[in-house]
Amino acid sequence: MPRTFSRAVLAGALALAAAAASAQEVNLYSSRHYDTDERLYTDFEKATGIKVNRIEAGADELIERMKAEGRNSPADVFLTTDAGRMWRAEEAGILAPVESELLDEKIPEHLRHPDDLWFGFSQRARIIFYDKQDVTEPPQTYAELADPKWKGRVCTRSGSNIYMLSLLAAKIAHDGEEAATEWAQGLWDNRARDPQGGDTDQLRAIVSGECDVVLANTYYFARALRTEVDGVSAHVDRIGWVFPDQDGAGAHVNVSAGAMAAHAPHPEAAKAFLEYLASDSAQAYFSKGNDEYPVVEGVEQAESTAQLGEFKADELNLAELGRNQARAQMIYDSVGYE
Ligand code: FE2
């Protein structure tokens, strides 16, 4: 074989290999958008040669979009927050199970779907924050928030919000529907104002003096410790916090989670990406990006969350939250929780 010809063949083979490599990609549909996630994606691209393409939108919007796209959907991976939203994705039929020994081993069982439809990659707790100026003995349990002694002093966001639905769904799983209904009624009766705004607004309402006791996810407060959050950061000394139910089931936790799309055109790359999210370095970026806690044991937590201290977390399987979501909404509706 003439030398020039063999070189041409070699060049051709190299070009083909390059084409195959560049065809390696993974399409993320994500409702996350944190600066540290950028580093996450470039690290993955460097390590695997798989290019990351992203579409970002709200979770419900992405679910609708994947449903509408059906078999033609380019989505490989769906990323969102709250197991309750993953349940909506499951119900919409847009997720595929991922068989991965690595994920089963690294991610605690209660933070992933029992049939491997989604995996939690960082966690947050929904806890009690209070006004240190007006409250000397803050509630130590979720149940106490519904005690009449807190009448006119408690603030939460709306009963249709996913965090409030997941919290009540957990209550249903632990104590049954009747107790959950009584609790929702008590909490509603204790409101200092009608529900408004997001979790940061509940913290701001402590600072403004409108609310003495509120519910919020840990990362909203941790973020205010790390960076300037208007109306909160300058007054963090006024805000106290309690991880509830430490003598009982533990504080209610939820996750930021990832899943493979039902019609993923690049299932191998999707699996590789999900497994990468469980690596030590990715765990650090993924959790720190939103001031959440890593899920993989031994990974160091962010400085911001470390300031909140250790706590006992509820180990209820988060898939339960989805199963009880419709009942939770019915209960809030039945007591008039807006
Ligand atoms: Fe949030």
Image (cartoon, grey):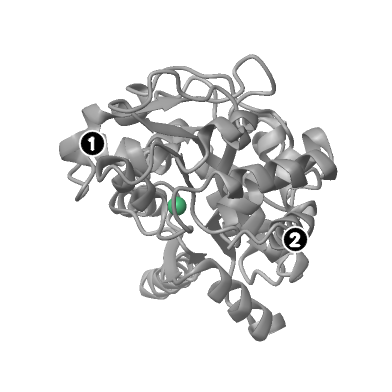
Q: Is residue 338 visible?
A: yes
Q: Is residue 299 left or right of residue 249?
A: left
Question: From the image, which quarter does the C terminus lie in?
Answer: bottom right
Circles 1 and 2 in contact, beta carbons < 8 Å? no
Which residue was labeled with disc 2?
334
Above or below residue 268? Residue 107 is above
**Could you say where residue 39 lies in the image, as x and y percent from the top left?**
31, 49
Among the 4 quarters of the image, the one containing residue 286: top left
314 vs 27: above or below: above
**Sequence order check, earlier mark of 1 and 2:** 1
Name the spot of residue 159 as percent of width and height, x first: 60, 58
Task: Indicate left or right for 79 with 51 as reference.
Answer: right
Left or right: 286 as drawn, with respect to 87: left
Q: CA distance from mark 1 to mark 2?
A: 39 Å
Neighbourhood count class around disc 2 (C-alpha, 10 Å): few under 14, some 14–19, many 20 upward: few
Q: Nearer the viewer, residue 311 or 123?
A: 311
Q: Amino acid at mark 2?
A: Ser
> As displayed, is residue 130 above or below residue 337?
above
- State the residue at coordinates (43%, 58%): 32
Q: Residue at x 70, y 72 (%)?
A: 263
**What label does residue 153 carry, if any?**
none
Bin the neighbour count of mark 1 within 10 Å (Cα to Cα): few under 14, some 14-19, many 20 and up.
Answer: some
Residue 226 badge? 1
**Residue 271 in sight:** no
- Element under label 2? helix
> What percent of the width, then of the height, locates residue 45?
39, 54
